[in-house]
Image: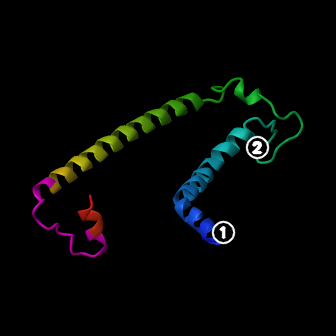
């Protein structure tokens, strides 16, 4: 096997992981930007780094200083918790419904088994 073929095979084996890592990096980039610029000693705008007096911990000394900030954080955590619970319950219910459906139709052909691309995914559950 040539080096080019080995490299192609190595990349093909790890393609999904590489894409997943790139997507995660892309999604977390704004969080990283916000974190880094939270140490910026800005005057009017926090878009560009101010070399005078940066980095600083000034903005972290009183995190609940701006009005409504801690209340907003609490609301966000509550909404996230409720959304997680709802998604968990809906996912569990969907799983149970799928099990019940397939348990009653073991000997029958599923309605979508003859629809082409759906037949593989439905029958291999």
The residue identified by callout 2 is: 46
Give the residue number, with chain letter if any, for mark 1.
3
Residue 57 in which image quadrant: top right
Q: Position of residue 94 (x, y in %)?
A: 25, 50
Seen in the picture, residue 32 relative to 15 is either above or below; the reply is: above
- Farthest right residue in view: 52
Quarter holding the N terminus is: bottom right
Look at 67% across and 43% down and name the residue there: 32
User: Does residue 65 appear anywhere in the picture?
Assistant: yes
Q: Nearer the viewer, residue 10 or 37?
A: 10
Q: Is residue 68 visible?
A: no
Q: Earlier in the sequence, mark 1 or mark 2?
A: 1
Magenta stretch: includes residue 52: no
Task: In this rendered view, identify the residue nearer to me: 47 or 6.
Answer: 6
Q: Main secondary structure of the magenta part?
A: loop
Tell me, yes or no, whether the highlighted magenta stretch contains residue 111.
yes
Q: On screen, 115 above or below 76?
A: below
Q: Residue at x 63, y 66 (%)?
A: 7
- Disc 2 crowd rating (10 Å Cα; few below 14, some 14-19, many 20+) is some
User: Which residue is found at the position 44% from the left and 38% from the top?
Assistant: 80
Query: What is the span of residues highlighted in magenta in the rendered image?
Result: 103-119
Q: What kind of element bears circle 2?
A: loop
Query: Relative to residue 85, is residue 39 drawn left or right?
Result: right
Q: With respect to residue 89, does 67 lie above or below?
A: above
């Amino acid at each position: 096997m040539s080096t080019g073929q080995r490299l192609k095979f190595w990349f093909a084996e790890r393609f999904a992981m590489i894409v997943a890592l790139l997507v995660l990096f892309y999604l977390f980039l704004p969080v990283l930007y916000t974190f880094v610029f939270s140490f910026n000693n800005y005057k009017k705008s926090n878009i560009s780094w101010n070399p005078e007096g940066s980095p600083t911990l000034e903005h972290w000394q009183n995190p609940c200083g701006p009005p409504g900030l801690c209340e907003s954080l609490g609301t966000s955590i509550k909404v996230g918790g409720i959304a997680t619970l709802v998604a968990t319950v809906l996912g569990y219910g969907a799983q149970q419904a799928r099990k019940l459906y397939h348990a009653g139709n073991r000997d029958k052909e599923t309605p979508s088994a003859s629809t082409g691309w759906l037949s593989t995914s439905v029958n291999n559950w």
